[in-house]
Image (cartoon, grey):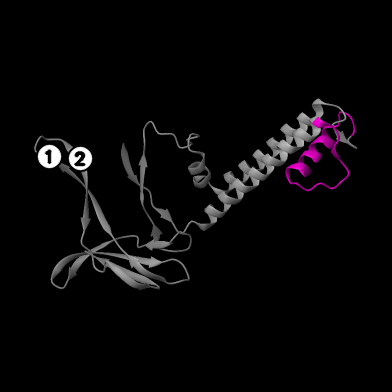
């Protein structure tokens, strides 16, 4: 496992939001065994495109099922994929304009299955969209360079941070850690996380900027 820092610049702002990025060997970015996490972690354009693709796939699949038996949909032209497709969309959305309707037992069974799939699909997509919108994200900006200087007669590490949103953050808790490479007595190298004592460790109000000192 290798570690690299990759700062993400904020446009038109001298500060930056930085973090650690790890390159994992043997781990897949798209793990289909965990679709819930995948649906929440993909970018919005990919999520929206996937929703439309699944919707089109479901409607097309049921449209082909309506074509299996001729005359199962009343007022639909025999063998017309367009009529079957648009009837599939109306059924999946539970609209029902009244022009076309199931006419046989087979048509009713397929339409009932599509309605159930449509209700489940709508409920799942609504929940995923709500969770994606409701995820809290604090926009914290970091100064480009930390500073080591004397403060109260001691060498002090200072890091300037800022609140990147127009609203005020309250009851903010801060932590600072250092990842240091150490060598054991056996001569093996490993990385150890040290939690540093900082001041302030908690800020009641965080409207603009704050200097964290260690």
Disc 2 is placed on an element classified as strand
- Rendered image: mark on residue 184: 1
Whether pointer 1 and pointer 2 mark residues with C-beta atoms closer than 8 Å, the reply is yes
- Give whichever of 153, 186 is nearer the camera: 186
Q: Where 65 sits versus 148, above or below?
A: above
Q: Position of residue 91 (x, y in %)?
A: 77, 42
Q: Is residue 124 left or right of residue 189?
A: right
As drawn, which residue projects farthest toward the front?
A: 105
Image quarter in which the N terminus is found: top left
Q: Residue at x 56, y 49 (%)?
A: 128
Q: Residue at x 15, y 35 (%)?
A: 188
- Give whichever of 12, 20 is nearer the camera: 20
As drawn, which residue projects farthest toward the left?
A: 185
- Rendered image: mark on residue 190: 2
Q: Which residues are magenta?
A: 77-105
Image quarter in which the C terminus is found: bottom left
């Amino acid at each position: 496992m290798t570690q690299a820092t990759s700062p993400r610049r904020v446009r038109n702002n001298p500060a930056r939001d930085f973090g650690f990025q790890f390159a994992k060997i043997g781990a897949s970015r798209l793990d289909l065994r965990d679709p819930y996490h995948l649906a929440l972690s993909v970018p919005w354009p990919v999520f929206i495109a996937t929703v439309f693709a699944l919707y089109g796939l479901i409607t097309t699949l049921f449209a082909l099922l309506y074509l299996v038996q001729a005359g199962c949909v009343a007022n639909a032209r025999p063998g017309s994929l367009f009529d079957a497709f648009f009837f599939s969309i109306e059924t999946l959305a539970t609209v029902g304009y009244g022009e076309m309707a199931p006419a046989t037992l087979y048509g009713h069974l397929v339409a009932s299955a599509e309605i159930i799939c449509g209700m489940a699909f709508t409920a799942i997509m609504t929940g995923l969209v709500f969770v994606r919108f409701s995820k809290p994200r604090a926009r914290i900006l970091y100064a480009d360079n930390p500073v080591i200087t004397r403060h109260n007669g001691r060498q002090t590490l200072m890091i300037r941070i800022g609140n990147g949103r127009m609203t005020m953050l309250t009851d903010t808790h801060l932590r600072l850690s250092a990842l240091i490479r150490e060598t054991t007595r056996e001569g093996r190298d490993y990385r150890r996380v040290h939690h540093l004592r900082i001041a302030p460790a908690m800020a009641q109000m965080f409207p603009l900027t704050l200097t964290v000192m260690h």
